[in-house]
Image (cartoon, helix red, strand yellow):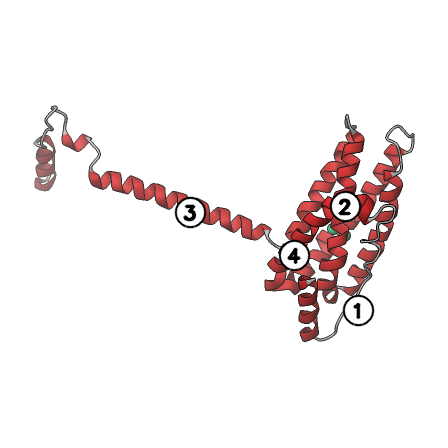
Amino acid sequence: MSNTQHETHETAKASPKSSNGHNKSAEPSILQEAAVGLFDTVKRATHSILHLGDKLAESTATGLLEDQHTEVKALFAQLEKGHANPRSVMTKLADSLAAHMVIEQEIFYPAVIAASPDLVRESYEEHAIARFALKRLMSTRPTDPSFKARVTALRELIEHHVDEEEDDLFPKAEKALGDESPKVYAHMKSVFDQKVKLGFAKLVGKGGDAVRSAKPPQPKASSKKTRQQTKTAISG
Ligand SMILES: [Fe+2]
Ligand SMILES: [Fe+2]
């Protein structure tokens, strides 16, 4: 043992005792308690920052639309597996799908059409076919022999459309929106919340024309005009 090690060993042995006879070095010192408190604070702050990061990551225009796609897919799965109350699932599906088509046609597609005009025009056409299939399904009783076939036909149509949006259109759209994406997200979310309360019948069904009225706008050529087009779509 070196001299220094020897001294340290001796000092430890001679450490003062508290009034109750316990070794003071075994009790948490003020410094130790402060360190633990600081560690907890840093841990909580790190958690909040990470959570905020998650929230910001979700707050993109395409993030919102993808979340809605996921919800619609889950409702299709419930219908196809067989649900105790298929009519309630159908209503939820139709309301969500109709409101989703409204925000895409009235806000999202006009804001991003310049990024991919052909894909956006194709999307309007696919929505028109989906609207027809959705109306057909909503007028079908769950006991009808064609019910399951109509659910499957609409689900396949939506799946094809969603795959094209998520794989081809959305990456181009996010790039084109850039910093405007959270604003488009906020506008779409607010309009979706209003429209979904109106429900399928008012949006697409008998007398509903909110989805029907939306037509593809002409994409603008210059980047200045594209930005203006995006701002118009955002402000509604
Ligand atoms: Fe769509
Ligand atoms: Fe979509």
Beta carbon at label 2 within 8 Å of ligand 2: no
Query: Given this view, does label 4 or label 1 mark the residue nearer the observer?
Result: 4
Q: Secondary structure at mark 4?
A: helix
The residue at label 1 has a CB less than 8 Å from ligand 1: no
Q: Mark 1 Cα within 10 Å, few/some/many (few <14, many 20+)?
A: few
Residue shown at 71% from the left, 53% from the top: 167
Numbered mark located on residue 46 in the image: 3
* Label 4 – label 3 distance at C-alpha: 30 Å
Gap between marks 4 and 2, in whole Å? Answer: 17 Å
The mark that comes first in sequence, 4 or 2, is 2
Q: Where residue 110 sits: x, y (%)?
A: 74, 63
Mark 3 or 1 closer to N-term?
A: 3
Q: Is residue 163 visible?
A: no
Q: Which residue is mark 4?
A: 187
Q: Which residue is mark 1?
A: 218
SS type, badge 3: helix
